[in-house]
Amino acid sequence: MTPPAADSGELSHADSTADVTGELLARYRSVRAFTERLCAPLHPEDYVVQSMPDTSPAKWHLAHTSWFFETFVLQPRVPGYAPHHPQFAVLFNSYYEAVGPRHPRPERGMLSRPSVDEVYAYRRAVDVALLAWLASAEVSAELRYVLELGLSHEEQHQELLLTDLQHMLSKNPIAPVYTPHLPPAANGGAGQLGAAGYDRFSGGLAEIGHAGEAFAFDNERPRHRVLTEPYEVAQRLVTAGEYLTFMRDGGYTRPDLWLSDGWQFIHEHGIQMPLYWEEHDGVYSRFSLHGMVPVDPAQPVCHVSFYEADAYARWAGARLPTEPEWELAYASKPVAGQFAGQAQTSLLPAHSGSPFGSAWVWTASPYVAYPGFKPEPGALGEYNGKFMCNQMVLRGGSCFTPANHLRATYRNFFPPTARWQVTGIRLAR
């Protein structure tokens, strides 16, 4: 039977609401399922280990992302909803001071209980409650934003889940393999690339930042004007082979290349090469989620700190791009590249010909508020704004980033010492 045509504003609004609800239901199921798919290769013991204070156990990621939906969607909106467990709010709150107390971050690996099975049961309970309620809920603009925020939040944790698992597995002397399946030629790289060319941009007065009704984090707004001088950006990421040349030229021993804090950092921690690299008799290998693999000179270098990226840029007679330079260079480019979850993708960064995916690039810009920035009201205002200090901006995404998570305006941020993320280098001048 053919449905009647919508001949009134009321019917059109109802159809529109049904479309929005259906879209959100499908996206919710997809995002939640992908998180669990990332955990499919794990053994029960893998879920619990926390290898350093900056990482979290896989079990905690699974529970925390469920706590987010329970705390910010179900409890404020569903009449009579009772939390799944009275103590989970303390165990799985991350940093939301306005919500209440929480378990110390460095001690998340001590949470042997609840069990992995209990955490999965928690996810099921939250999913059942949210999907049942959302199927008949009135989806306001405010509710849609909170749901989109929760889904984007979970996508961020999907990437963190992979980076944290890599760090955890790297601490095991037997070098466990997360996934052994590599696409053809994933170990082979792209052959001899030659010197990187540069794209030139005229600079001037322009706008950056998110605009429009589509979802974006609050730190991407408001759109505002910036002034840039003429500049150039390299057409590809710095390769491992180029970084090896920097190392062999004394890159880690020349104080003239390093910021003072960076020089202190590498000496306090004995850093002489990117994270996960090893050298035996002049041959370099690196730990990856595919296990130990040879360092491919043609693949992008990754797992370097801001300090290492900055030192390399000085050595190369260039610099790191600023945040406005990167966005203005690539705002019109399609968000396509090497991302997690795509068919035939490797968890080793490769040159894709796109500024997106493969490896995050450090910029020279500190993570600060855009002019006119206003955090979200209430506890959700703690999501981004309170971290706008002592962090540097990264752009572009990595091969661990979910495929549909990025925008040209997306601002990632980490301390300049961070190396366990898939962080690489793109030069500017």
Image: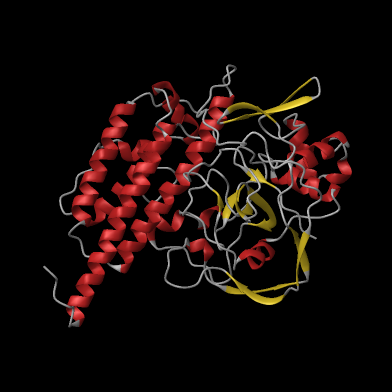
Side of 427 relative to 421 (left or right)? right
Figure disc tally: 0
> Residue 399, located in which quarter of the rendered image?
top right
Name the residue at 80% across, 60% down.
429
* Place of residue 358 in the rendered image (x, y in percent of width and height, measured from the top left): 61, 47
Q: Please state the horizontal and vertical placement of residue 401, each as a whole percent of the image.
A: 52, 47
Would residue 115 be visible to someone looking at this image? yes
Residue 52 appearing in the image: no
Q: Which residue occupies the foreground of this view, 232 or 81?
A: 232
Q: Where is residue 424 shown, x and y percent of the image?
A: 68, 46
Against 242, is 49 above or below?
A: above
Q: Residue furthest top?
A: 174
* Image point (71%, 35%), residue name: 296
Q: Residue at x 39, y 23 (%)?
A: 44
Image quarter (top left, top right, bottom left or bottom right) of the N terminus = bottom left
Picture coordinates of residue 162 (x, y %)?
50, 37
Camera-side residue: 305 or 87?
305
Taking depth in this image into account, of 332 and 231 the one nearest to the observer is 332
What colour scheme does the image use? secondary structure
